[in-house]
Amino acid sequence: CGVFGIFAPHQDVAKLTYYGLYALQHRGQESAGIATTNGSDIQLHKNMGLVTEVFTEDSLSKLHGDIAIGHVRYSTTGSSLLINAQPLSFRYSRGKVALAHNGNLTNANELRNSLGATGSVFQSTTDSEVIVNLIARYGQNPIEEALMKCMIDIKGAYSLLVMTEDKLIGVRDPYGVRPLCIGKVDGGYVLASETCALDTVGADFLRDVEPGEIVIIDKNGINSINNLRGARRALCIFEFVYLARPDSNIDGQNVVVTRRQFGRQLAKECKIDADIVIPVPDSGTAAAVGYAEESGIPFEEGLMKNRYVGRTFIQPSQEMRDLAVRLKLNPVRSVLEGKRVIMVDDSIVRGTTSRKIVQMLRKAGVKEVHMLVSSSPILHPCYYGIDTSARAELIAAQYDLDEIREHIGADSLHYLSLEGMLKSAGQEPGFFCNACFSGKYPIEIPDFEHMSKYV
Ligand code: 5GP
Ligand code: SF4
Ligand code: MG
């Protein structure tokens, strides 16, 4: 998911949030929503669909105030339904609050059970509603303190935006799994999942929110509580592999530069005799450029992408994913015919995309196709907010390298090694979560006895 929030009296906060969400659309395409407050009320508009589908001039003009938060959703826990769209808006003993969450709690089901046993009711199936209930439980305390208490109860990954009638608050989990950054605009501040959203609204980057930090923005300016620190940092390395937008910087590191470095490292690890290097656009482009630079094999655009089709993976059903690949990509015969091709993509999850693309390339007359992946095999589910949760769906968890190659139909298949990936990721290896590749989970994962009841 993507979150964007702004505190800026005298500005059109709903419009700016709309543009901020537009810049974060790649982080979720199922639903979008914006909540604003004018100091005494909270207005909310949300619906299923893309940002441009959900909002019109008319719906935006009804959202006014000095503060706004917005959300684009890609479901991990909770199904793709309107009831699960965010921001969530509620009223408790201290007034009105809206909340937008990126990440995934690992103990949501336990918390849901214990809250339910003592009288809480739930409308949605999201883990985010658990946070809402906890805030209400701690309602005898000011919101900052309620959030501090919440943070002791909740486990997992969360970059949260909370809006009260007079405050914008950002919270990042103690491990810093999901990104969250702060920007400065005329007369106020912005909080966003990625720096690309700051750029879009013309905000100046101030800094990233620290793991475990609570940032409070109100008429007194910006304040911070450094509440909890995790045992270590655990920024999701998959943000760099796939999720984040290439122009964003996360915790000081640029995404496209990192992707290119993955491609260079891949070229060092895996030398192939071929005529051209082509990316699977857009997610494989930077790594393909890196591979081409390092190997000296020319970079070509062998697949054209229809700009008007969204991310295939995000479509919830398999049927939709199949069709989406063909809608999205088309091979360029005159570039490909008779060539030995290295095709670079950022990752293989289920193997659907790669299999279809290899078929397309063969139809377009390639002589050989070597599939190179600029991350290591995804062997383990993610419990921290990326939708690769079911182990049974992960092709690399089910089959060995040659079986996957066979399934995909490539002449050869190579992944970047985990060591190579960490080495070229630009930080100390311990900075990142890499659990879906290594199986080493930095934060305790769900207790399966409690699973499946609500998910
Ligand atoms: P596959 O067809 O193997 O399941 O998906 C691989 C393709 O989906 C790659 O091109 C990659 O860019 C993209 N992808 C990989 N992981 C994710 C993810 O977590 N979310 C989304 N939306 N796309 C992904
Ligand atoms: Fe990111 Fe993988 Fe860790 Fe999930 S398990 S947070 S996708 S690195
Ligand atoms: Mg892709």
Image (cartoon, rainbow, N blue to C red):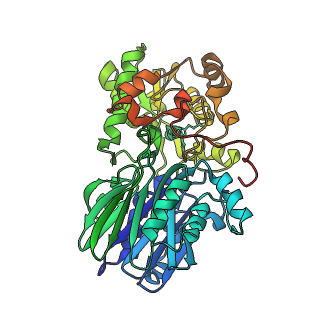
Q: Is residue 115 left or right of residue 384?
A: right
**Residue at the farthest bottom position:** 40
Q: Which residue is drawn at 60% across and 18% down?
A: 401
Q: How many numbered dots are placed on residues in this image?
A: 0
Residue 295 vs 309, above or below: the answer is above
Residue 90 vs 198, above or below: the answer is below
Based on the displayed image, in which of its 4 quarters is residue 297 positioned?
Answer: top left
**Residue at the farthest front position:** 140
Residue 294 vs 44, above or below: the answer is above
Toward the viewer: 343 or 144? 144
Q: How far across and how far down the image is residue 396, in percent?
A: 62, 26
Q: How far across and how far down the image is residue 25, in percent?
A: 46, 57
- Residue 70 makes an appearance in the image: no
Toward the viewer: 252 or 286? 252
Q: Is residue 153 left or right of residue 198?
A: right
- Residue 159 makes an appearance in the image: yes
Q: How far across and how far down the image is residue 53, in percent?
A: 53, 68
Q: How far across and how far down the image is residue 388, in percent?
A: 60, 40
Q: Residue at x 41, y 40 (%)?
A: 233
Based on the displayed image, in which of its 4 quarters is residue 130 positioned?
Answer: bottom right
